[in-house]
Amino acid sequence: MKRVALHNLGCKVNAYELDVMRQMLQENGYQIVTFDEAADIYIVNTCTVTNIADRKSRQMLHRAKKCSPEAVVVAVGCYVQTGDTAQMDACIDLAIGNNRKKELPALLEAFLKEREAGSVGAQAFVGDLSRPVPYEAMMLTETSERTRAFIKIQDGCNAFCSYCIIPYARGRVRSRKAEDICREAAALARAGCREIVVTGIHISSYGMDFAKAEDGFVGDARQAAHERGYLLRLLEELHKIEGIQRIRLGSLEPRIITQTFADRLRMLSKVCPHFHLSLQSGCDATLKRMNRHYLAGEYYEKVNILRNAFDNPAITTDVIAGFPGETADEFAQTEAFLERVGFYEMHVFPYSRRQGTAAAVMPGQVADAEKSRRSHILLALAKRQSRAYRETFPGKDVTVLFEEPVTVNGVRYMTGYTGEYVKAALRTDRDLANRIVRGSVSGFLQDDMLLIETAPESLKFENK
């Protein structure tokens, strides 16, 4: 039995796909070990979203080869898809691009047989994603994290933001059939999973390829998908699945948020009041250079729609500091806009120049020191806003999906997350893992962790 170690880099879609690859390998008789252990095969699911991500991918591949020089090192995913396979890094034995990950066991087995027969040359299997391709069918039946599972509903992106390489790494939008998604969710529920996270490269575009295929289609396919409610209809079907207690959404584009969207979403009690709305900048001029297709004022309207529809929802976002051409005044506009909106969490990134994108050759590249300075300003703001949001919880009732125990100052607590994805703890000796418990927030156990209270004899489980 060959030993295989797997490591994931990058997004939630990558995490889902690695879970499927792990599952396929186990089904084919491989023994899964940790990446720090000696293994016969090392598999790195790579990321290429920034130059830093590229570097991390290379570092993990080199680390694997150094750990076991005789092992087979396999690179899969975005770094492979956007690289020059004719000049592959010498540490890579087998390279597999996107939309071919389901072929991993077969490609690996063929490679191993050829190697045993004396063929030791590196091999690459990378398809052309510049043209339309079918959705790569993958099915997850269990996950290593029993409480929560990612469910991938689509792949690809047609947005072509000026800083982003992902449309080239992942190809055009292709959506998964709703019946396949629901079948996977039902299987995960039977395996004991209580929460699903709906994810994809650009889930707001879910169904736009379905719209294109409909007879008589004309106009904007993404707008047609929004109007026909493909994502909403999928969520309504997932809501019906017995055993699934929570549905959490991945990143949404602001344009999908309408009053109708929010009203229908509010009717689904399992949908968590936690919405990640990608922003990137609060300055209209910068948004235009980013090719983001909305203005800051429109974004603010979308946030208010969600806040009027849900009780104190968690709004999170991404922000890029120091985008090419960002002046001191434009940065000040972004900072003021972030202050105005008020987020639960902000993921702040200094702009990373990614070769192959329009932004990489734009004039006005901001110096690294200035990008770092602006990032630190926004990170400090993010910390203050996150604390302010958490401080709205004491005195309120919340439900917590518990995951694991921790010990703080010699006292045992169970920890998990509220529907808003705020970490919370309950003092108890009971094993509440994978249980949803209702309690009252009494304060904070730690700076970033709510403390809830509920009488042991009155624990109210919302799932069996």
Image (cartoon, rainbow, N blue to C red):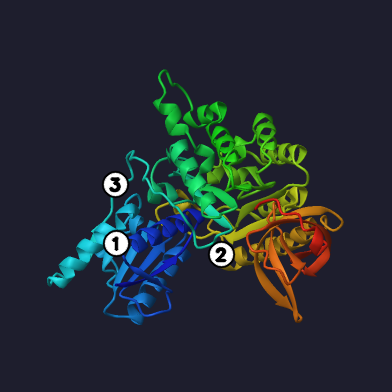
Residue 345 drawn above or below residue 129? below
For the residues labelled 3 and 2, say whether their Cβ atoms are less than 8 Å apart.
no
Question: Which residue is identified by label 2?
Answer: 367
The image shows residue 410 at horizontal and vertical percentages of 75, 81
**Res 6 → quadrant:** bottom left
Q: Amino acid at mark 2?
A: Ala
**Total numbered badges shown on the rendered structure:** 3
Separation of residues labelled 3 and 2 (CA atoms): 35 Å
Q: Amino acid at mark 1?
A: Ala
Q: Which mark is residue 178?
A: none
Q: Give the mark nearer the N terminus: 2 vs 1.
A: 1
Secondary structure beneath label 2: loop
Mark 1 neighbour density, 10 Å: few (under 14) some (14–19) many (20 or more): many
Q: Amino acid at mark 3?
A: Asp
Secondary structure beneath label 3: loop
Question: Which residue is identified by label 3?
Answer: 128
For the residues labelled 3 and 1, say whether their Cβ atoms are less than 8 Å apart.
no
* Residue closest to the eye, 99 or 56: 99
Q: Is residue 189 visible?
A: yes
The image shows residue 13 at horizontal and vertical percentages of 47, 53
The image shows residue 340 at horizontal and vertical percentages of 77, 48
Separation of residues labelled 2 and 1 (CA atoms): 35 Å
Q: Give the mark nearer the N terminus: 3 vs 2.
A: 3
* Residue closest to the eye, 197 or 363: 197
> Between tags 2 and 1, which lies in front?
1
Which residue is situated farthest in the right direction here? 395
The image shows residue 464 at horizontal and vertical percentages of 65, 53
Secondary structure beneath label 1: strand
Question: Which residue is identified by label 1?
Answer: 95
